[in-house]
Each structure stands twice: as structure tokens, then as C-alpha cells.
């Protein structure tokens, strides 16, 4: 009994730390993971998801209030602008705020360099 209780407690702690927990739509999880990975393949993956499905999930946020657009701005590197363009064209809100009040537009400006906002 002690082992089961301990395992269950650990699982609950892991759920609290999981930034993907809040998301309700599995395609948004795929968008966020593709944006997090970055690279040319991620641009193709995001384009494929957006072309094959309705886009009502592009503004969903994770536990920290982050969106796929924010992750594309933060982790996209030289392909970030392409990912962000696809997401904005699909209806992603560049001014949606995370829990700290940060927007994708602010992240793009900070991370940007020649590939940013």
C-alpha cells in the first residue's frame, strides 16, 4: 500500500509540473512540440497540421499560458519566422499573454535578431 500511495503521489507531482497538462486539443500539443523542436521539418509539420484540420485550437495555452506561437518565437531559430507566419495566418494571436504577461510578439522581439518579429 505504501508503494502505491508513493507512486500515485509522484504521478500527481509530475502532472503539476507538466506544461502540456492544460491543453485540451491533441493537435495543439503537436503544434507546440513541432514549434519547440524547430527546424525545417517543424515548419512542414506545422503546415501539414494546419492544412488538414480546422484551426480553432491555435490559441490554446499550456499550464504556463504559453502558445505554439510563443514556442515558435522562442525556439524556432532560423525557421521561427516561417513557423510564426503559418501560425499567425491560421489565426494565432501574437498579443495573447502567458501567465507572466509576455506575448509572442515580445518573445520574437527579444529572440529575433534577423529572424525575429
Image: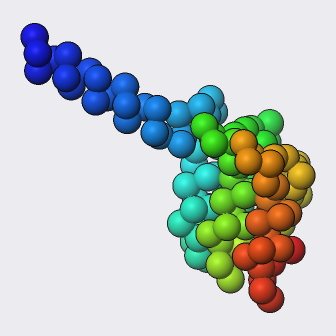
Residue 30 horizontal/vertical position (percent): 57, 49
Residue 81 appears anywhere in the view: no
- Quarter-wise, where is residue 54 in the image? top right
Residue 66 horizontal/vertical position (percent): 68, 48
Who's the residue at 83% across and 64% down the image? 106
Does residue 42 appear left or right of residue 90 in this picture? left
Q: How is the image coloured?
A: rainbow
- The correct choice, above or below, for 2 with respect to 18 in the image is above
Who's the residue at 78% across and 42% down the image? 59
In terms of depth relative to the viewer, which is nearer, 37 or 21? Answer: 21
- Quarter-wise, where is residue 46 in the image? bottom right
In terms of depth relative to the viewer, which is nearer, 65 or 83? Answer: 65
**Image quarter in which the N terminus is found:** top left
- The correct choice, above or below, for 80 with respect to 55 in the image is below
**Image quarter in which the C terminus is found:** bottom right
Residue 97 appears anywhere in the view: yes
Does residue 27 appear left or right of residue 101 in this picture? left
Q: Of all residues shown, which one is farthest toward the front? A: 100
In terms of depth relative to the viewer, which is nearer, 73 or 91? Answer: 73
Who's the residue at 80% across and 48% down the image? 101
Residue 28 horizontal/vertical position (percent): 65, 43
Does residue 50 appear left or right of residue 75 in this picture? right
Residue 5 horizontal/vertical position (percent): 20, 16
- The correct choice, above or below, for 64 with respect to 90 in the image is above
Amino acid at each position: 500500500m505504501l508503494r502505491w500511495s508513493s507512486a500515485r503521489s509522484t504521478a500527481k507531482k509530475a502532472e503539476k509540473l507538466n506544461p502540456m497538462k492544460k491543453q485540451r486539443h491533441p493537435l495543439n500539443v503537436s503544434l507546440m512540440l513541432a514549434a519547440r523542436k524547430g527546424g525545417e521539418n517543424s515548419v512542414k509539420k506545422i503546415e501539414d497540421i494546419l492544412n488538414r484540420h480546422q484551426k480553432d485550437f491555435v490559441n490554446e495555452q499550456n499550464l504556463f499560458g504559453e502558445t505554439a506561437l510563443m514556442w515558435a518565437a522562442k525556439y524556432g531559430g532560423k525557421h521561427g519566422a516561417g513557423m510564426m507566419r503559418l501560425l499567425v495566418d491560421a489565426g494565432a494571436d501574437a498579443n495573447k499573454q502567458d501567465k507572466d504577461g509576455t506575448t509572442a510578439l515580445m518573445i520574437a522581439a527579444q529572440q529575433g535578431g534577423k529572424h525575429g518579429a
